[in-house]
Image (cartoon, helix red, strand yellow):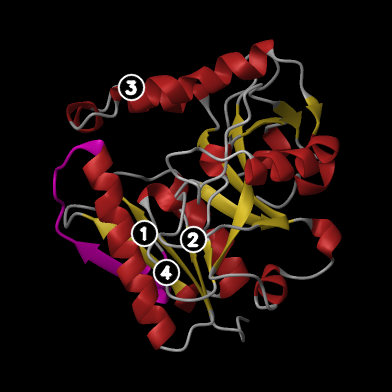
Amino acid sequence: MNKYKIAAISMARNDTFFIPKWIDYYGSHFGMKNLYLILDGHDQALPAQHKSMNIIQIAHKTMPRLKGDRYRARLVSEKARELFQQGYERVIATDIDEFLVLDPVAGESLCEYLIKPAKGVSRSALGLDVGQHLEEEDAINPDIPFLQQRKYAHVSARYTKAVVANKPVTWGSGYHRVKGHNFHIDPNLYLFHFGMVDYEQCKRKTGNQELLKTGWEGHLDRRFQLFDLILKKEAVDGDQFFPKARRRQSLFRPVFALNKPGMLREKPIVVIPERFRDIV
């Protein structure tokens, strides 16, 4: 299936909701034998498909959120470097709730698209933070494609991440940037973040004592603002806004990190185009 040798890596702890989705999605594109899932802790249950993929189980280290983010990025960068040495041509690194999607208008498979020559050492995908419209949408059903159940997303530079490595790289925390290199936002790639796809599930996460003790409370509070944004902002057509978002995120960068995309101050909410509905 994956004749181009493309690998996908992620790392997870205490997750039973997104891991099966991540395995099914990336396995369908790259082949199960090219999936590398790092399980953070020997207490973590193995996924049902563990025998057909690569599971790397490590000892859990309790650490503050920011330090933990850097630790995870370093581990994944080291693993990606190994995979390039083994002959892989591309390595995709995402959080467990993030899904790299090729626009169907490209007319080819994700593998075929990614293997084409590209600028620089990495490619970024335009970040779409998908959330539940609390007045229009029901609780998520994990057995149905998410984008059949969710219509709105925040176009967010926080998720316009350099997740596609064309060569060995060192990712910064959360894969937001590649150290020592510029970024390029690909015109046909999107990164759908589903961490806030269901309100009730998110509420349960805010009660996770392990996360609260390691400094996640403020981060989770900020992420909860997405539900208010979707309720209160007038949504604009995604296809009309996406080119503007790529251009502005590339031009207006944070002065403290010029190799990261800039935030869009109006916090735009878009209607996700219909052609994506059956993909994830």
**What kind of residue is marked 4?**
Val
Residue behind mark 2? 23
Real-space CA distance between mark 3 and mark 1, rounded to the nearest whole angstrom: 30 Å
Residue 121 lies, with reference to residue 141, above or below; the image says below
Residue behind mark 3? 218
In this rendering, would 152 be left or right of 183?
right
Name the N-terminal-most of marks 1 and 4.
1
Magenta highlight range: 49-65
Q: Nearer the viewer, mark 3 or mark 4?
A: 4
Residue 21 lies, with reference to residue 117, above or below; the image says above
Binning the other alpha carbons within 10 Å of mark 4 as few (below 14), some (14 to 19) or many (20 upward) gives many
Residue behind mark 1? 47
Real-space CA distance between mark 4 and mark 2, rounded to the nearest whole angstrom: 23 Å
| Element under disc 2 | helix
Residue at screen point 33% across, 22% down: 218
Residue behind mark 4? 169
